[in-house]
Amino acid sequence: MPVTKPIIEIVNVVASATIDQKLDLYDIQKKFPGVEYNPDQFPGAVFRLKNPKTATLLFSTGKMVCTGSKSEDMARKAVKLVVQKLRKDGIKIKKDAVVTVQNIVSSINLGGRVHLEKAARTLPRSMYEPEQFPGVIHRMLDPKTVILIFSSGKLVCTGAKTEKDVYRSVNNLHSLLEEKDLMIY
């Protein structure tokens, strides 16, 4: 059994949303001076919030992408707040945004070192090419995530769709590392 419990920190939640209608990004930029919109460089407008500290990309199709939140709830709140602010300043939005979490990125500390060479040979669906990247790239099937494993015992987990999946992935991997004697304390 694991000697220490992994410390897991969610660092970014990416969520897409749609309001099912077209948006006039020039109009939004006019009404919100803080909104960045340079269609020559990027087709979306960037709507930043201070609280929660996020950036929501708005597209003329009515689709949105929210980045920078630290939880699923925060991502949903941020999109809801952007829609509220747009409505408040006269942008007619008929429906509430439908939000879908696309990716959760988290940073993990296992509290011990990992033997990378052995881990790469032992763990299924793992790749280790130290000349190209200093960590083992481990693809987990259930839940479907990718975990970068570094010798320091630090991990980066990406691809999770729920916070529960992050915890499940990390705990499954940690147990496997312990079981196969790949952790050094």
Image (cartoon, helix red, strand yellow):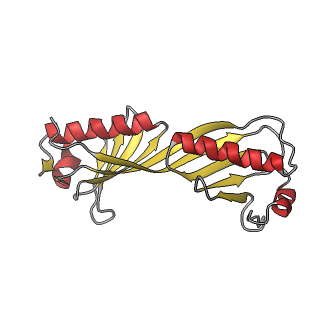
Q: Which quarter of the rendering shows the N terminus?
A: top left
- Give the percent coordinates (x, y) of residue 28: 82, 57
| Residue 170 relative to residue 82: left or right | left
- Above or below, 173 against 115 in this view is above
Q: Quadrant of residue 169?
A: top left
Res 124 seen here: no
Residue drawn at 79 percent across, 49 percent down: 86
- Give the percent coordinates (x, y) of residue 50: 62, 59
| Residue 47 relative to residue 167: left or right | right
- Give the percent coordinates (x, y) of residue 125: 31, 41
Res 12 seen here: yes
* Foreground residue among 4 and 123: 4
Residue drawn at 46 percent across, 43 percent down: 159
Residue occupying the far top of the picture: 142
Q: Quadrant of residue 80?
A: top right
Residue drawn at 11 percent across, 43 percent down: 181
Residue drawn at 64 percent across, 37 percent down: 99
- Give the percent coordinates (x, y) of residue 23: 83, 49
* Foreground residue among 129 and 13: 13
- Above or below, 39 against 139 in this view is below
| Total numbered badges shown on the rendered structure | 0
